[in-house]
Image (spheres, rainbow, N blue to C red):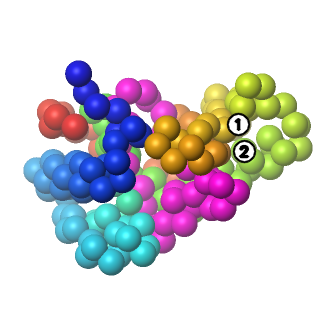
Amino acid sequence: MKENDSTMQYQARVDKGRAREGRIMEEMRKQGLDIIPASTSDDILRGIDGYLTLVGHSWSTQIKVRQSAEDLLFVITECGKPGRDMKTQADLYAFLIQDQLYLIKTLEVRKAISDLVELMNRQHQRREGKFRVTYKGVDCELSTQGDPVSGNSKLMAFIPATLFTDVIDPIHTPCRITI
């Protein structure tokens, strides 16, 4: 039985996440992408996992994985403060969803999340901690959840990748790595 990452101790989650990021970077290199890992300080202080070179430009990159669903998951706030996905200084998200890798500009994600939070606040329509809305023709969800380990309240966004039209390059890869 797979262990749920959210119930693991902090250091175990960090170690597992770094190993997963390394495997994803290796798969990206196999697909012809030029990516190098970030320093530990860039990872911790700036939320940057690696640097991806595309069209002659180096993009600081945050790697995210979604195994069990087909949407992008973002931590907006935790304990009323900006969540890790709102604090990252990365230019791009490299988001692996099942077999597809999406490279999405961080600014596009932040704009969508800002719009969704504004809609939620304006409509005051949260049911059971969830707010569902069609935004730009795509069904999205904001949800308040408690962290299983810390108990801290988090506001999460669940957004289908199809929302982002300013995707730099959706890469359809035959990723066969075990995550």
Q: Give the label, 2 or 1, closer to the camera.
A: 2
**Three-letter amino acid code of the residue under disc 1:** Tyr
Measured as percent of width and height from the top left, residue 44 is found at: 38, 70
List the single residue furthest toward the top: 1
Residue at 43% x, 73% y is 46
CA distance separating discs 2 and 1: 8 Å
Residue count near mark 2 (Cα–Cα under 10 Å), binned few <14, some 14–19, many ≥20: many
Measured as percent of width and height from the top left, residue 149 is found at: 46, 43
Q: Is residue 149 visible?
A: yes
Where does the magenta region start and end?
A: 64-93
**Three-letter amino acid code of the residue under disc 2:** Leu
Instruction: Give the residue number, with chain letter if any, for mark 2.
Output: 116
Residue at 42% x, 56% y is 93
Q: Quadrant of the N terminus?
A: top left
Q: Which of 103/25 is in front?
A: 25
- Examine the structure image and report whether residue 70 is included in the region drawn in magenta: yes
Measured as percent of width and height from the top left, residue 170 is found at: 36, 44
Residue at 30% x, 56% y is 11
Q: Is residue 65 left or right of residue 175?
A: right
Measured as percent of width and height from the top left, residue 106 is found at: 51, 60
Instruction: Give the residue number, with chain letter if any, for mark 1.
Output: 135
Judged from the image, the secondary structure of the residue bearing numbered disc 2 is helix
Judged from the image, the secondary structure of the residue bearing numbered disc 1 is strand
